[in-house]
Structures are given as structure tokens and as C-alpha cells.
Amino acid sequence: MDAKDLNVVNKPVIKMDALGLACGEPAFTDDVEFKGLLCGKILWSPHAHARIKKIDVSAALKVPGVKAVLTCKDLPRVPHTTAGQGYPEPSPYDTYTLDNKVRFVGDRVAAVAAETPEAAHEALLKIKVDYEVLPAVFDTFEAMKDGAPVIHDEEDSKNIPDAKHNIAARFDFEVKNGEWFKEADHVFEHSWKIPYLQHCAIEPHVTIAHFDNSGRLVLRTSTQVPFHVRRIVAQALKIPVKKIRVVKPRIGGGFGSKQEVLEDIVAALALKTKRPVKLEYTRKETFVSSRTRHPATCRLKAGVKKDGTITDAEMEITLNTGAYGSHALTVMMCSGSHTIPMYRVKNNIRFIGRSVYTNMPVAGAYRGYGATQGFFAWECLMDMMAAKIGMDPVEFRKMNYIKLGEGSPVFKAMGEGREGVEQVITSTGLFEAIRKGTEEIKWAEKRAKYAAQSGPIRRGVGAACMMQGSGIPEVDMASATMKMNEDGSFNLLVGAADLGTGSDTILAQIAAEVLGIKTDDIIVTSSDTDITPFDVGAYASSTTFISGGAVKKTAEKVREMILEVGAKILDQKKEELRLEGGKVVAKDGASCSLSEVANTSLYYYNQHQITASASHFAHTSPPPFQANFAEVEVDMETGVVKILDYVSCVDCGTAINPQLAEGQNDGAVLNGISHTLSEEMEFSTNGTPLNASFRRYKIFSAADTPPLRTFLIPTWEPAGPFGAKSVSEIGINGPLPAVANAIYNACGIRLFDAPFTPDKVLAALKKRG
Amino acid sequence: MPEIIVKPSNLKELWKMLPGLPARRRYLAGGTDLVTAGVAGVEHSECWIDIGDLPELGSIKEAAGSLFIGSGVKISEIESSKAAARWCPALVAAIPHFASPSLRNMATLGGNAANASPCADGACSLVAEGASVLLALKGKKRRLPLVDFFLGPKLTALKKDELILGFEIRKRRHAGAYLKLGPRAYFGISKAAVAVTAELSGGAVKRVRVALGSVAPVPLYAARTSAFLADKKLSAETIAEASALVRTEASPITDTRSEAAYRLDMCGVLLERALKSLA
């Protein structure tokens, strides 16, 4: 099959929720009113590390309107992880809904539910807490030393590899093939750093916990992982899964932060008060107490021969996971598993990974998921190696990148939190992506032109290539159910979670393609644990590939059932029939409409509901590939870096919806550009966040957006639905290295420390002299 | 937000109602500083007096020798004023750097000065324009050079209940420039900013006024640099000397927005560029 044979897939179908959202229809978690809704608020720790000796809530309870005040004494003590991952989660069980110890400024101390926000706020002020302040540690390398403060000294936490040295996760891996660096003509060793970054989804974390008419707990919540929310809330509060329903309405962005299960506390408040309770994070709370990207130090040592062969590579990544180890192991492993296979390494490979506890905000999943941290180092080093051996950096990459049919020992050795799967590359458009990108940015012409420049304004172009995954092989699973209605329309029920990404639309396109109908004839219901079948949720770039696979299988089953009924109506052999244009069509031209099929099955003949369910998981995770090119202007006197042009060529297999795929990539790239030039969470020396607001933490706006040019490079991935791979994350990894390399091309300085603010750029220029 | 917000319809009514208002009261103009401070929990007045629509503060008036910009004039109105473009080019050059288009529709020049932030784009450029500020308290008016109005971060010469009527800029033919380094393309507070006005005559400048933003406790008038540049030809050497001199006048701090040393350097770089743009 080929993309040109497709009728609905690979077409820019209008996003099905777009008009309603644009018109402000009530769609989001907080758009619905509940009678008697209480306001939930949390008391956050002012200390980076302290033991709670005593909490007195008596004054708080006396505040008029206050219905409940919860402390750790009121809740079961269940070690769990907030990482919304498949069961058993590969993250350590080191978190408690409420604990007698606080581990960062912004950790939970107590929770309040009251009739009004004002009463809840007043109650928080009246909770008296007696803290024993403990020594705190903020730096990963300090935290690993003997005698450092032990952040997880509790006895009941599980799966922490070395609590004494604050190590939340570790993974080492080696391919040994002779003596290290023996063949290398040049050996490089540098470290790259990424700071604390926040997702900045426009909708904050918000949950309304209420009860249905049989007293079951319903969590209406802004989440990427409804089924994991159900399981983890049940676990943390010791209530049966069957007593909980999780509903995901429309979501105002997630980017990984909502792969985190923080709903336990509002559920506990509702259970305590037997009233509906809403908990909505403020922007400050979102910055400090939701989740962040793992800050990283990535040391990369690699050898290269004069002919461009990469001989050896040693990658050591140290992630700061903050006070809890959410995604600590998997982000760390992905920093290597997504990056090391990108280029052939002839002899030796070593990966040393550590995720380290500190008394800082908690890191979690964030678009890119380790690959962002890893590729910053890798792609900058590729540029340095090319420069040293006098090769064009693009040619050097072309010589070394993983080709069709090739595998890597890393695929098998490094999965997500466990062993991976063996795989070879079954589709790649990287060659074409590089060709298109070099042409669009005018690579050769500009490299030559910018070789000799003077004056205060210098220009440069830089490149970076990358890959990601498409779901987690043999871990991620999704399922779908379809049923047919009288008018030939279909209900499609999916567990997949549309976060604004457009997954409802593209899943409908996949079903419509199989059934020969228009997307309008599919009614999508997604992410309601009572109604839709299971799906791990929206993460790991899995929805198109895994959930799409489930929808395709389901639609194929439905197609068979339709054809059976159609065969009876048309009195033809089933094998002679096909679905086309909303009809069952025979080879001889005879046809009947789908509504006739539906009515026949429902009312007349061998009565039955045409319906089917199917599940899908994958044995491989075919990587999308991307070539990025940035053109920058560096102001040598102020250090200001301006991006003049950014070309991003992405091979996501078949783009199910090219317009949405381009939008995903543009968004990811702008997110990455904002990381590159602006974003950084700052802290005082005692761990207090200094810029936890949009007033001080500057994300790039429309006015800052340089020309972003995304080009989709079509390939056909045999394992994906209609040849599709993923597209949602890969784009965020490009700007840091592409811009760093362009800055080098412009003015000869290498930057290792993100973001590249004017102060830092100018300091590097001065240092070079 | 306070429980009481009053809105007098003219100045006379304002002076009359003052004695009856709670003691902890503040004037509210565009609200872009005050309301956000309220939301952030750092503004605790009992009463706000909304002066945003007082007719006496709301216009730009051209007289024989000077231009008057009422304190209640919205920043976006200045942007489109021909008189402002002619008589205060540095102020007009600062406007694209001022917050965001939506805030410029709300914010007033009087509020920008009364808030007394050392980073205020409007105030800094007005210092370079050599503006005077007209103040009023219960019918009593006084006039101050704007440089004497700013006493420190968030501190002004305003007495209790005194308000800014407007700003007066002497009409003189001059060129102006405003250069700012912020965190992103718009809607960001400056790391450093330089405002310059210069009366040009042939290849030389007669009088120059240099003002600096975000590098001192107040929007700073760089007196020595301004004096040095008077009656000089804007040669490369003069510009370089001025740019070295201006670094000795600023006293920046290191904060979340920038490093002190970087800010100091930037005063020089921005001044050099501003002067070159005028030459």
C-alpha cells in the first residue's frame, strides 16, 4: 500500500473539536458546574527538607466554611509513585499522599476543603506546623557523596537502588570491542547542562472529584493517563479500582506534566467530606509543585578517526530528579536509548546513568523524555568532531547515521526501565530530510558565505539530526471499540487521551479510511474509564502508532461484519465486496448503503449489533527521524542570539493528518527554541523558586517566533497504521544543538550550558577573546 | 483588591471626597501595576481612587513653548500622536518596548512614573526628554524636573494624596533614540535600556541628554556623559569615550533578570548604538 491510495488518511481533515473550542463551548475540566462544590487547597512546605514534628489543625477546622483538613495522620501510608506509567511502574515507590516529612520547598504538608477559596486560604494560614528543619542538598553531585543528607530515609519506600547516596535510579551498559579509544585519532570529552524547565501548559492541573448516584468516586481531571490515574489513586488511598471512574474532558495541554498522578489528594478530600471538591493549581503551584523536566549534566567522551569513523563513545548522564523519583529510571535510560543508536560506533560503547534525589522540585515526564538532554550533547559533539577532522557536519552525519535495515545493540540492551527489544530500522526518510533541509536553508551557500565575517553582527547556520520512538515496545497497549448506528455512522470508543493533540481526529480518520466513509460519520468518545476500553494514555509518542493500530484492527473487524451483512443483502460472495463511499460495493457495480446494512442487522435479519473491539501492542518502536537547520544572528557586543530561520524536516512515516502533524512539530520546535534562548527556573540558595510565574519565567511568544518551516518527509513504516510513526516529541530536541552549532558557525564559540542567554553568550565571547 | 474603589468625575470632586476615604488609599490609573500587585498579594490598600478617566489628566496638548502629556493618557495614544512624535522622539521610540500592545491600551504614562520602577521604559525616556512633572494636591500645583521626582526604587517625591497631572516637555527640535535589551521580543522587563535625546546642528550635537533604565535605583539621568557630549562632533572617538564614561555612572545590581557586569557593559554598547543612530 502507498499513501497515494488513501482517501481520508494523509488528508488535512479539520480537527473535530476545533470549532467548539474556538467558540468557547464548555469543554474543559473546570467548565462544568457542580452543586455544593468545595474548594480544595494544599499547604505547601516552606522548607527544602524538614521533619514535621507536630501539626495542629484545630484552629483551621474552626474557620467557618471549612469542611476538612487532612494531614498524614488521616490517610493510609502507601508508598507509591506518581509517574503514570504501565504497571508495575519502573519508578521507585517513594511518595506518600501526605507524609511526616517534607523534601522540597513546595512539597505537600496538609490539605483543606472549604466552601469558598477564601475560607480554604484562611484555614491554610491557621494550620500550625512544628518543623524540625534538616540539612538539605540541592546539587546532584553533592547528593551522591558519603554523608550527604539522606532524602529518602524512610524504611517503607521501595525500589530505590541506593537511598543512602540519594540515587533514585541507575543503569550502566557496555559494549566492549577491544581497547578504548585505541583507533581514535581524536578524543573529545565535554559536559552539557540543561536546567529546570516547566511545561507551561496553558491549562493548569485541575481535578473535580465528585460522586455518581451510587456513591462511586468520579474524577473529572486534566490528565494524559486516565487509566493509570484510576489505578494509582486506588492504590494510594486503598480503595478498589471499581469504586473509581476517571473522565478526561478536553485538555489544555499536557506535554508530559499530566502523565503524573496528583489526583490522590483531591480524591481524599472528597471522600472525607462526601462532597464534590475541586483542586486547581495556581500558576505558581504548577511551576513549583507539579512536575518539571529533569535537569541534566551529560558528559560525552567520544573518539573519531580522520576518515570520519566514530570509534568509541562513553555517555554519562546525571539527572536531577528532585525530591521524588518520578520517571527517574526511564527518562535517564531514554537519554541513551534514543540517542546512542543514532550513529554507528565502531568499537566500544558505554552508558552510565544516574538519577539523583535533591531537595528540589520533582522532575517528571516532559516532551522529549531524556532525548532532549541526550541529543543536546550528542549533536553538539558531532559538530565538534566534524570540525576537527575538517568534514562538513552534514556529510559527517550522513556517513554515520543508522540506515535502513540496521540495528543497534542499544535497542536490545536499553528499554524503558528494563531490557529493550531487538529491532532494525524499517523506514527512514533521514537522507531525504537532510537533502530537503540543506536545500531550504541554503546550507552550502551559507556555510561558505559565513566563513569569513567581521563586525558586530555575525550569522551562522547549524544542523542537528535526531530520532525518537513510537511508543514503548511490548509495554504500551491500547484498545478501541466500535459500534454501528442506523444511519451508517459509528461510535468509536478509545482509551487514548486527546490533550489538544488531535488524536480523536486522527483515530477517526484511521477508522474512516478502513470503512470507506468520511470522518464526520465517526463519533469519538475518548478516555472515560467506565465507557472506553483501556489505553495506557498519551505519552511516549505512542498514540498514533499504538492506539492507531488498535483502531485500525477494530475497524477491520467491523468491516468484516458489515461485509457479511452486505453479502446477504446483495446476494453476493463476501470476497467480492468492498466498502467505498459509504456503501458496500460489489465487483459488478451492485451496492447497498451502510444505513441499509445497519438497519438489516439491527431490525431484520439475524439481528445483531455490528460492533467490535481490538487491542494493539507492538514489538518494535520505529523511530521517526528529523533533520533540523537553524540560521542565527549573533550580536557580538550584546550577546543577543536571534534565530532568523528554522527548517525542520521530519519523517513521521505517513502523516495521518499532515496539518496536525505540522502543527505538532511547529509547537515542539518553538518549545525547544524557548528552552534554547530563554527558559530556566531559578532558585535561591535554600531551594526557594525565584521565578515561578509567567511574569518572570519567560516563554517565547508569537512575537518571538522566528520563521518556523516544517517539512514532512513521507515514508511508509510497515509496522504502523497506514505507514505512520510518531511526530509529537521529536521536534523539541532539535533547537538546542542546532542553534548551538549555528552560533559556533557564526562566531566560533561553543556553548554547553542552556539557555543561551545574552549574558552567557557575551561571557563566552569574552573568554575566547 | 480593596473593598472600596471610588471614581471621582473630576479633580474638584476628588479633592472633596478625599477626607471621607480610608487612610490607606492609592490612586488607580491604568491598573497594570496596581491590579497585578493586588493579585500577587503585595498591594494592601483599603481604598483605590480611580483617576483613569479624570478629564484634566486625559489629553495631549500643544502650547506655544511646550507639549503637555496628561498623566492619564494611555501609552497607545502617545504612540499615535503626531505632536509626541515631533517633540519627544525618545519617548515615542520607547513605546514599542513598553510591555505588550494590550497593556499599552490600559497603561498610562502617569502610572508608569508613579510606580517609580527603575526599569520603566516611559519614565526613562521622559528623563532623556528633560521633562518636568506637574503635581497637584487639593488645588495646589507644583512643578518638578522629572529627575528630581524619582527618589529610589518605588519611591517618589509625591506627597500623600498628591497626584501627577502630567508631563511637560519643552518644544525644541531634537532627535531621540531608545534602545532596550529585554528577555524576549516583547513583554519583558529590561536588563538594560538607554534613552538619548540630542539637538543636532550640522555634524555636531549641541545638547544631549542620556538616561539609563534598569541600571540604578531610579531611571537615571547620566549627567556626566550628557555634559561630556555637549557641543561635540559625534565622531567614533567621542562615541567610544562617551560609552566608556557612561559605564562609570551606572550602578546596576545582579538579579534574576541579569548580571551587574553585563548590565554595565550594555550601558556602553547601547549608548554607542543610540548615538550612532542619531549621527
Image: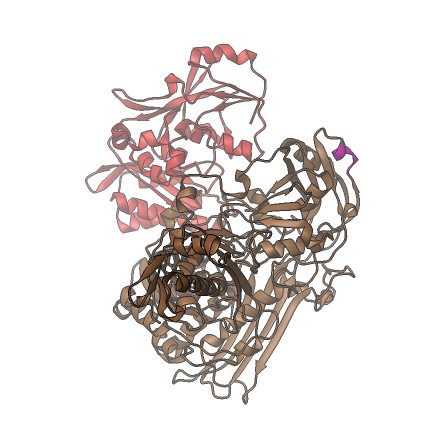
Chain colours: A brown, B red
Quadrant of the rendered structure where residue A284 is?
A: top right
Front position in the image: A585 or A601: A601
Q: Residue furthest bottom?
A: A178
Q: Is residue B167 left or right of residue A356?
A: left
Residue at image coords 40%, 33%:
B123
Q: Position of residue B82 (x, y in %)?
A: 25, 29
Front position in the image: A307 or A285: A285
Q: Position of residue A666 (x, y in %)?
A: 38, 56
Q: Position of residue A569 (x, y in %)?
A: 39, 60
Residue at image coords 68%, 33%:
A122
User: Height in image: A511 above or below B48?
Assistant: below
User: Height in image: B101 above or below A649?
Assistant: above
Quadrant position of the N terminus of chain A in the picture? bottom left
Is residue A431 on the magenta stretch? Answer: no
Q: Position of residue A695 (x, y in %)?
A: 49, 42
> Is residue A45 at all visible to an observer of this figure?
no
Q: Is residue A674 left or right of residue A123?
A: left
Quadrant position of the C terminus of chain A in the picture? bottom left
Is residue A59 on the magenta stretch? Answer: yes
Q: Which residues are magenta?
A: A57-61
User: Height in image: B129 above or below A107?
Assistant: above
Question: Magenta-highlighted stretch: main secondary structure?
Answer: helix
Quadrant of the rendered structure where residue A180 is?
A: bottom right
